[in-house]
Amino acid sequence: MSEGLVRILDPDGKVLEGQKVPSVNRKDLLRLYRVMLLNRRIDERMITLQRQGRIGFYVGSMGEEASIIGSAFALKPKDWIIPCYRELGAALLRGFPLFDLCCQLFGNAQDHIKGRQMPNHYASWKLRFGSISSPVGNQIPHATGIGLAARLTGSKDVALVFFGDGATSEGDFHVALNFAGVYKTSTIFLCRNNQWAISVPRQLQTASRSLAEKAAAYNIEGVEVDGNDILAVYSVTREAADRARRGEGATLIEAVTYRQGAHSTSDDPRVYRDEKEVQEWIKKDPISRFRSYLIKDGAWSEAKDASLEEEIKNEIEVALKKAEEIGPPSIDTMFEDVLDTVPWNLEEQREELRASQEHESVQQ
Amino acid sequence: MPTINIIQAVNDALRTEMKRDDRVVVMGEDVGKFGGVFRATQGLFQEFGGDRVFDTPLAEAGIIGSAIGMAMYGMRPVPEIQFVDFIYPAFDQIVNEAAKMRYRSGGQFTCPMVIRAPSGGGIKGGHYHSQSPEAYFIHTAGLKVVMPSNPYDIKGLLIASIRDDNPVIFLEPKRLYRAARGEVPEEEYVIELGKAKVVREGEDITIVTYGAMVQVALEAAEAAAEEDQTSVEVIDMRTLLPFDIDTVIASVKKTSRVVIVHEAPKTCGFGAELSASIGERALLHLQAPILRVAGFDTPFPYTFEQDYLPDETRIRKALSDGMNF
């Protein structure tokens, strides 16, 4: 296990002494920044939308964008991302259209998952961005299986799986790391340690000194990284991916970060945590840190930032407006995709629903 | 045609599919070099190597959870759960993940895999080596559930299950592993999932059953024919989800009397679903109440195992009650 927290930028976006900035071209740096900002503005906008009652629920990733986007950036397009439910930034980075996101939030007729799940549970086969399940930690062993399948079929594909600090208490976390250790799977376990599992603080999840140190028990690599430093997150994830492709097995990365917002729109963190703590972490915000770095580097300016903000705002409004006008999927689709074909019992139930709705409309 | 037992038929089906399709891999506790505690995977490790047949750490959630990822990636894993009684640590992975992957992703991701598990009592295994938990899985949207009763069906149904694009729970009647023998063709063949089979034709009363109970039901039917001159039809359901309601209803319309037999506990067992489905479709054809002979609503007992399991006596009693109603 590597010693200490890996960090390249200080909270003001200055490169720390002795640290090497990973080689990323300017175009990509600006793309990363754009996706971070887009992610933040989408989150803010959708939370408002939920408050207005236009969508039922929302989960944001405010404060955790660097850990999500920086790690996803370290992958190749064919690699797999197995998300938890806060990884919008990773999907956006891969090209998941904002319009598709909006359709999923509304569960409308153009939602790729056909209105089957709550907001934030989008999936994209095309982007190798896995299907989201709400129970914490369930997805972790899937990434072990994907990393194992890659190894068994002689492919260089890597699976990156996201989860929070709370999920490290689940059995699925431990079986996934154990299997990954035994089979040396091509898996990167990315724990976003955002300090809070709804209202339960990190120190009540585990007595371990760090989450990364749990890797030692399974004899896989463990790394602790400043999760608010996108360059550091990219750098350690890239190393983990390279290691996996060399057949050297899995890595557990603990990205130390902070959930600046509520767990979800159903939560009120003022009840259980000190606002001062939140303010301390906001000073270490990943987006402003990266912005300062880019400005110092000469790649960005306040003026460009203002026009990007305007562009993003319009983009969100256009996508939202277009998606909100689309009606729900056909009710027939409710009975599809349970199995590959619709069996007799579901066909019968579909008929039953149809008949009762016709009966109702006749009565009205 | 060679005569083989159920365990050999499982082995034959696995070997057939592994030869045919590189994506098929066998994984589980002790399935590698050792060939499985029941020897279902014997020789496969030696024939196909450690990348196609491998032992796993002792963690059912890890076995199924990893298999899900492998299936998503495009492989066809056939994980073995050593005894179905040990499947519960993987319940979340089966019910919330494997079974829901297709639906919740709008059909984008699928999870084709066959979870094989020895099931049922009769081997002096007590509560933890004897359970019949099929109802949990029949109650789960997104799964298929299969439970064959003889070597011929095992081979054809296991091959069909491996080729199926859905997650399949494949329950093997372990007390018949070596006891049930039959002729099985050496070549490959499939038995379509979702199709029951009338294994004994009769006129007076129908027994609907599956798994190890098929043999017991057939014996009871023979005895009833000889001693009571009752002509009993016996249906082997073979697939429990989606189940073959048409074959059941056709028989009920012919005989107008039904006895459902299963080892699993009575309350909310598969028999309850069958009974309700028959009632919905054929009430006016019935001359007697639908009767159930099932395991009791107790944990599976050790000493009283033979009293717990439906036997010829209890089935004969139900047949007689049905006939004399």
Image (spheres, helix red, strand yellow):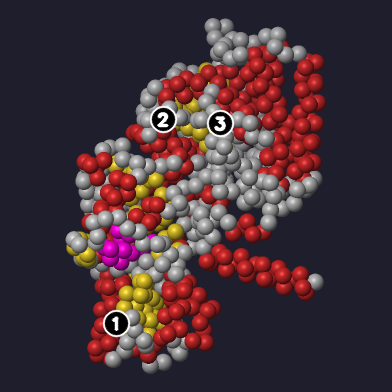
The residue under the point 26% across, 40% down is B48
Labels 1, 3: one chain: no
Say which mark, if any, is on residue B221: 1
Q: Is residue A138 visible?
A: yes
Chain identifier of the residue bearing label 2 in the image: A
**Amino acid carrying mark 3 in the image:** Arg
Say which mark, if any, is on residue B304: none
The residue segment tinted magenta is B146-156
The residue under the point 76% across, 37% down is A319
Task: Tell me how far mark 3 sits from mark 2, CA to CA.
Answer: 27 Å
Instruction: Look at the picture and state if B312 lies above or below A34.
Output: below
Q: Nearer the viewer, mark 3 or mark 2?
A: 2
Q: Residues within 10 Å of mark 2 (few under 14, many from 20)?
A: few
Say which mark, if any, is on residue A155: 2
Point out residue B198 in the picture as x, y percentages from the top left corner: 35, 75
The residue under the point 22% across, 52% down is B39
**Amino acid carrying mark 2 in the image:** Ser
Pointer 3 residue: A192
**Amino acid carrying mark 1 in the image:** Ala
